[in-house]
Amino acid sequence: MSISLDSDVARAAIAKRDLVVDLARVACVLLVVVIHLLMIGVGIGADGAIIASRPLEAQPWFAAATWAGQIMPLFFALGGFTALTAWRSLERRGGDQVDFVRGRVLRLARPALPLFLFFSVALGAATLAGVDAALLDTVATGVGSPLWFLGAFLLAQSFAPMMVRLHEVAPARTMLVLFAGAVAVDAARIATGIDEIGLANLVFVWFFVQQLGFWYSDGWFRARRPWQLLGFVVLAFAVLGGLVAAGWYSPDMLVNLNPPTVPLALLGIAQVSLLTLVHRPLAALMRGKRMQAGVFFLGARAMTIYLWHLPVIIAVAGIALLVPPLSPAPGSPAWWATRLLVFVVVLALVLLVSMPLSRFETASTAIPEGLRRPDAAATWTAMALTLLPAFAVMQFFLDLPIALMGAVWLAIALWLLRSRRPQNA
């Protein structure tokens, strides 16, 4: 009886869920893996030294492809959808922003801690072993590059409850203020040549894109007719093309990522509109139980896949160097022909790695009965300690000191967020 009841509850929960969001989230993560797999080439030079290259970026069509391949705006919009849903559910149960922030920090800090520990050990051992400093710096910069996402995403998610309130009171005005702020920040950065000014767009751009997820969740995009959605896509890309043609932004949308810029806000509009346009066929696809099982399996370990795929890619490339036939020259026809096989191998290994590690991502954030949550000061301190190592990677790239700092600070953050005994116990 209980099994049947549990199954009925699960089916009811799935029926209320927008499964297209789950599918899109998994697709975004897998696309990131594919892009990084194609961007990393490791070979042996004529002098026998290991050479790292970026074959994908060498292609003449690469910049144009990034207009479709830069899917981080969609990732943040999907995060806005889930944040709005989670916040409203938490409010109904009597929770507040401190509860929300604690949950979001735990969801990111727990899976990130093992990675920072791994980097600390790996980079420390390589340094002690006398590995070439330039090569080690190149590898560390590459494998640590995705960590910027932790800081930017956590910042947006932590202030989601406040932004939801603004969305409920003044949705259009909130969007206009955020977009105008992004434009003003970019204008100041371009006029002065001081790139650090662009860091303010960690708020304006990513909060704007997150708001798009709120609008999507509330059904605004679904209420638009197909020709209107298509119009949003065309208009967004037309404005983006004009900004690039004026020379204000790079045609390479990866260059426009850190610090985030107005083109990402425009891509967010286009991507959410496109997702809505294809919602019906994707929803039909997600009605299949096998499709649901596959998406839920990957979705439950999406952050683990995101965090660990680059170390696995580098490891596979390094091992392949030991067997020359398995390591064609990066960018050669043979190299391109083997990418699908390498993708399958990398994904299989990442999933293998995720078996023991995904528990950090899926562990419950609930407070056990009889215990209490940490106070607001401890929670916000933990949020800052989780954000800062990712911010350091974004600004200075990963190295041994940053890896050690991240491991220590994330451990402290998790300690601060632990459940506590009642004060009168």
Image (cartoon, rainbow, N blue to C red):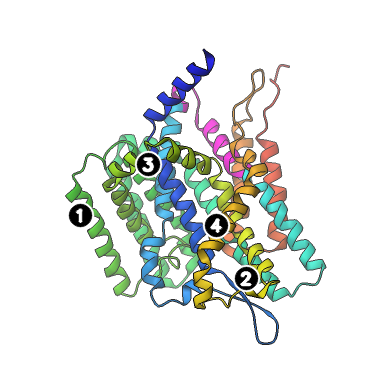
Which residue position holds label 1? 231
Nearer to us: label 2 or label 1: 2
Q: Disc 2 or 4, which lies upstream in sequence?
A: 2
The segment highlighted magenta reads 90-110
Q: Secondary structure at mark 4?
A: helix
CA separation in Å, label 2 and label 3: 38 Å
- From the image, give the main secondary structure of the stretch colored magenta: helix
Q: CA distance from mark 2 to mark 1?
A: 47 Å
**Closer to us: mark 2 or mark 3?**
2
Give the residue type that dot 4 points to: Val
Q: Position of residue 288 (x, y in %)?
A: 39, 37
Q: Does 108 appear in magenta?
A: yes
Residue extending farthest to the front is: 325
Which numbered tag is attached to residue 344? Answer: 4
- Front residue of 109 and 202: 109
Asked whether residue 114 is drawn in magenta, I would say no
What number is the disc on residue 326? 2
Label 4 near label 3: C-beta < 8 Å? no
Q: Position of residue 156 (x, y in %)?
A: 47, 46
Q: Earlier in the sequence, mark 1 or mark 3?
A: 3
Q: Residues within 10 Å of mark 2 (few under 14, many from 20)?
A: some
The residue at the point 70 percent across, 70 percent down is 136
Mark 1 to mark 3 CA distance (whole Å): 22 Å
Q: Are marks 2 and 1 in contact (CB under 8 Å)?
A: no
Place of residue 413 in the rendered image (x, y in percent of width and height, measured from the top left)? 66, 42
Amino acid type, label 2:
Leu
Disc number placed over residue 20 in the picture, else none:
3
Q: Are marks 2 and 4 in contact (CB under 8 Å)?
A: no
Mark 1 closeness class: few <14, some 14–19, many ≥20 residues within 10 Å = some
Residue, far right: 128
Q: Residue at x 71, y 71 (%)?
A: 322
